[in-house]
Amino acid sequence: MKADTSQLKILEAAEIEFAEKGYDGARVDEIARRAGVNKALLYYYFGSKEILLKELIRNYIQETSHNVESLFKDFSSFEDKDIDRFFDRIIEFVEAKKNILRIITIEGLKMGTDNTFLFELLDPIYQKAIEKLKEVGRDASDKALFLLQMFFSTTVPLIVFFSVSEKWSEFYNIPWNTAKKKFIESFKKLHKLFY
């Protein structure tokens, strides 16, 4: 379904509202106000706040899958010189998607210890990354190690940094651009060991 302008405005407003207040604190009235539409139109397109959240997540998954495919097309080999550029692209994508990632992480964690929502969401992306790394000649044969590194050493630090770094910078009185630069430098240095 190709979204029209009103649908896109509603999705953008919902992403901001959910990121600021969480799913439970977000209000449909406020999403409609931010989008510049009436509540009836929001319900016409999405039916409920839950459907709206699911649509945001579905769009994110599609965009991420496309981004992973595109990312690996740009790297026919995966030599050390390419790793910086590779991670620049990942960091750029995560920074642009920080609101939806904050929402997904918070909602995933709130669902309790029995819930595997977050892992189910990320698994297709990780599986595609494993496949693509093998295609460009990198060793991804130790799947358990690769998945550990992808989740705990790559995904979690990026999401946490871009979700809370602005408040962290304010609290410690460190300019955000300085914090970002130092984070990226240390992130890349660590990941050169893994990949």
Image (cartoon, grey):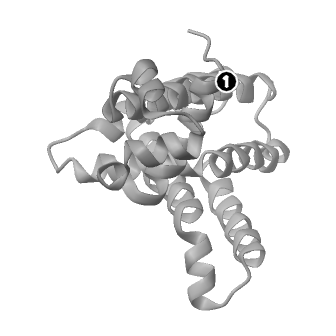
181 left or right of 9 in image:
right
Outermost top residue? 1
Residue drawn at 61 percent across, 26 percent down = 6
10 left or right of 26 in image:
right
Provide the residue designation for mark 1: 5
- Up-down relation of residue 83 to residue 49 (above or below): below
Asked if one can make out residue 182 in the rendered structure from this viewpoint, the answer is: yes
- Residue type beneath disc 1: Thr
- Up-down relation of residue 3 to residue 34 (above or below): above
Of 40 and 90, the residue lying toward us: 40
Tell me the element at label 1.
Answer: helix
Image quadrant where one finds the N terminus: top right
Quadrant of residue 4 in the image? top right
Coordinates of residue 118 in the picture (x, y in percent) = 35, 40
Coordinates of residue 146 in the picture (x, y in percent) = 47, 41
Residue drawn at 50 percent across, 62 percent down = 160
Of 118 and 85, the residue lying toward us: 118
